[in-house]
Image (spheres, helix red, strand yellow):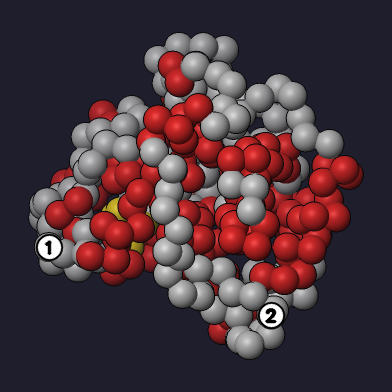
Amino acid sequence: MAWRDGAQEDSVLPSKQRLIELHIQHHVEEFYNHTDGPRFNIVKNFYYEQHTRQTYDYAVSRMKHYEAMDKLILDPWDALELGGTFNDDSDPDNELDQIHHSFQVAEALRKAFPDEEKYGWLHLTGLIHDLGKILTPAFGEPQWSNSGDTFPVGCKFERVGVFPRFFDENPDSKHPIYSTQLGIYQPGCGLNNLTMCFSHDEYMYKVLKHGKNATQITEKQLPIQAYYMIRFHSFFPWHTFEAYTIFEDEMDKQNKEWVQMFAKFDLYSKSHDVVDIEKVKPYYEKLIKQYLPAKLYF
């Protein structure tokens, strides 16, 4: 069958309390710390660049640059290894290369949701959720055009999340339309109809949905929740701070809890204890073969 998003997953999520407890061995306050710490200046400088330079015109132009997905063809595992060399300046919690973080998330999800038949797609989503960070090592995108918390452009920047004051220096903050609450959008238009800042999240979503990839034959299909997780896991203003909810449609509301769950594993699975990649590699190679095309067009 052609590789496209499968049916809505009807499994019931564990309670929020259990999500926090499941195989997550750190205190919540240890993470998402943007007030101090050894990486504070690196993170602050990153967000200054991102918040002041990510405009509507910029986001549209960068996605236009990549929309043909004609710049690179890679086996998914090779893409994982290439993107895995990336070290994220926006992350206040972790100095490990990206590939170690990806396996930490995947394995944390695997322990919490061990039913392979039912949740193999979720384990794989944990592994590939940041695959779009290939943008920097493969194509030279600056970090502020790749990682960090995401937000829509073309409407008012909500003053929530990380260093929101930096948005004051973004040219769109003075634009007569983009500076208004709705901007170019309509209430209830759906997150799918927003233009997001250019990032690995939006880019990887577009990679997966592009015809060159989505029409290839695969054994299984990723469900819609996987696409929500990949596209919006960094959209903290929405899934954590309840901003931009004026744009939600019913599909967004139905899938929000899945994104919130995934974001907790993405955030709280970080550790200096790395996963033995060679030990778990056969399992994830099997999932990749089941769900992803043999070659991905980037």
Depicted 72 relative to depicted 108: above or below: below
Who comes first in sequence, dot 1 or dot 2? 1
**Mark 2 burial class by Cα count in 10 Å: few <14, some 14-19, many 20+:** some
Name the mark on residue 187. Answer: 1
177 displayed left or right of 3: left
65 and 241: which is toward the camera: 241
What residue type is disc 2 on? Answer: Thr
Mark yes or no: residue 122 visible. yes
Q: Residue at x 67, y 37 (%)?
A: 104
At which x and y percent is residue 93? 56, 23
Q: Between marks 1 and 2, how big is the CA–CA gap?
A: 37 Å
184 and 100: which is toward the camera: 100
At which x and y percent is residue 286? 79, 63
| Label 2 residue SS | loop
The image quarter in which residue 188 lies: bottom left
Depicted 141 relative to depicted 207: above or below: above
